Image (spheres, grey):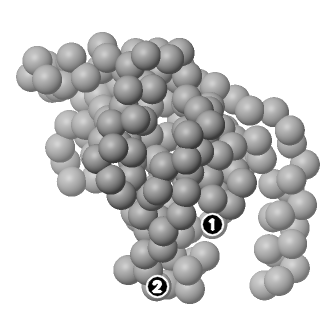
Amino acid sequence: MNKILKLMLVGLMSSSSIACASGWTVKTDTSGNAAVFSPEAEGVYNGVYFYMNAQATLFVRIAGVSCQEMNKNETQKVEFGNVSYNEQQVRVKVLCAGDDIAMMPVTNKGKNFILNQLETTPEVHIITPKGREAIITSKGYTEALEQLNSGDSHKATAI
């Protein structure tokens, strides 16, 4: 098992580019409700992917590894940490959301800061507590929210 983790870490550390995907969309979440999601962006390390929802929850997916596997099937395990959003530290609650890692702002002030960044800047540069980095675009954010709020969410696609 340790050899597999070491190989994954070597693979994760071999890339130095940050991808920035474009276009927020309305999709159906795992509860069957329409929700607004950013496009998935590959982080600095290959195989680490990020996306965000309109409630400022950041999701991290590591290819080939589920959150439950990383936490030894402790699906209810909750931790706290700081995530940097455009160089501003925001306190987050970190927990499993299916196979992904979810990082939710703890305070309304933190959530409002992130949402303001999505509305007023072209992109949000993110650094997680474990040092994983990505850029989430703001392109299409307000349009997707307007689509969701207009009730035109029947065009939502399943994720």
- In the displayed structure image, the side of residue 70 where residue 54 appears, left or right: left
Labelled pair 1, 2 in contact (Cβ < 8 Å)? no
Q: Nearer the viewer, residue 93 or 52?
A: 93
Q: Is residue 63 visible?
A: no
As displayed, is residue 69 above or below residue 35?
below
How far apart are the alpha carbons under marks 1 and 2?
Answer: 14 Å
Q: How many circles with numbers are drawn on the protein? A: 2
Q: Please name the residue that numbered disc 1 is placed on.
A: 65
Quadrant of res 38? top left
Kind of residue at badge 2? Glu
Mark toward the viewer: 1 or 2 = 2
Q: Which mark is residue 74?
A: 2
Q: Which mark is residue 158?
A: none
Give the image location of residue 134, x and y in percent: 65, 38
As displayed, is residue 108 above or below residue 142?
below
The residue under the point 21% across, 18% down is 147
- In the displayed structure image, the side of residue 133 where residue 105 appears, left or right: left
- Where disc 2 sits, the SS reads loop
- Location of the C terminus by quadrant is top left
The residue under the point 55% across, 29% down is 124
- In the displayed structure image, the side of residue 80 where residue 109 appears, left or right: left
As displayed, is residue 88 above or below residue 65?
above
The residue under the point 43% across, 16% down is 120
Crowd tier of the residue under label 1, counting other residues whose Cα lies within 10 Å: few below 14, some 14–19, many 20 or above: some
- Location of the N terminus by quadrant is bottom right
As displayed, is residue 78 above or below residue 146?
below
